[in-house]
Amino acid sequence: MTTRGDQILDRTLSKVGGKGLFVKELEVAMQEGAADLAVHSLKDVPMELPEGFELAAVLEREDPRDAFVSNQYQSLADLPAGAIIGTSSLRRQALIAARFPQLLIQPLRGNLDTRLAKLDRGEYAAIILAAAGLKRLGMAERIRSFIEPDDSLPAPGQGAMAIEIPSGRSDLQDLLAPLNHTDTELAVRAERTLSRSFGGSCQVPLAAFATVNKDAMRLRAMVATPDGKRIARAEISGSAATPEALGQEIARVLEAQDAQSILAACKTE
């Protein structure tokens, strides 16, 4: 199915309804019996699912990093002043603006082929995409370099796929349970809890990234203004068995850095 999120290309996601545009029509198909389940990029799934739906499985995470894609340059640091960067993400916009204020950041919409075609036509000097999408679609060769999480902290759920089903479908729950990857599920539960605390959506430049090592979890998070001039960052570690508690704890750490006023500023811009 092609959703409105794929069809509306002349406006930013934050202005046409948010990431839920990629999900809603698939949920309608499930309600009407045209589909039994839907597979989503988890970062596109709203923090609160509508009544009557649940996530049955979270698949093992692919590469969570952002990818620098360009036909001329090797990295963001190589771009000359005034070069145009394309991205659909306020999070990426904020992080690039904070590190490279001399670059021009412009919206980039469309599916992967559309975005790459715009780059190839010379509309952008470089574009920033999720590495996972390029790898899954066999286009990893387009990646000139990876942007490490220390420089571009991923969005909540980035690199993970989730399977959504109608609530109460025990047959589907049993069928899909073996696909669930426990460490990825725990990590994204922490990330999404943090995002939910701040009303996370594509209108909010917010990042959250958790990693699991045996029984321990490391969770990093950030909120920023789109121009990158105000950023709150935090990092905590704790038990992987309590991901929601870690998500709530890091939200409090960010709140102590005036994160709410940063997000309020975003909504007035």
Image (cartoon, rainbow, N blue to C red):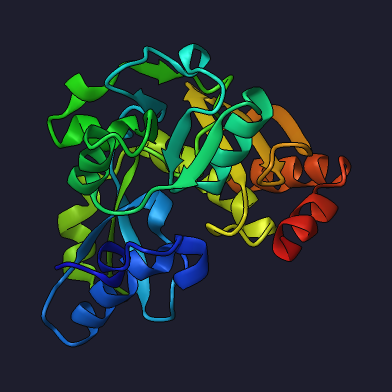
The answer to which image quadrant residue 266 occupies is bottom right
Q: Which one is in front, 76 or 14?
A: 76
Question: Horizontal and vertical percent for residue 126?
Answer: 38, 29
Q: Residue at x 39, y 48 (%)?
A: 108
Question: Horizontal and vertical percent for residue 66?
Answer: 42, 29
Q: Is residue 257 left or right of residue 36?
A: right
Whether residue 242 is visible here, answered yes or no, is no
Instruction: Give the position of the C terminus as an image quadrant.
Output: bottom right
Q: Residue at x 56, y 29 (%)?
A: 103
The answer to which image quadrant residue 133 occupies is top left
Looking at the rendered structure, the number of numbered marks drawn on it comes to 0
Instruction: Give the position of the N terminus as an image quadrant.
Output: bottom left
Question: Horizontal and vertical percent for residue 150?
Answer: 58, 19
Q: Is 113 located above or below residue 154 in the figure? A: below
Whether residue 160 is visible here, answered yes or no, is yes
Q: Residue at x 49, y 26 (%)?
A: 212
Q: Which one is in front, 203 or 117?
A: 117
The answer to which image quadrant residue 239 occupies is top right
Q: Residue at x 34, y 27 (%)?
A: 63
Q: Which one is in front, 170 or 1?
A: 1
Question: Horizontal and vertical percent for residue 97?
Answer: 63, 33
Q: Is 36 located above or below residue 215 in the figure? A: below
Most extreme residue toward the bottom, as rendered?
A: 32
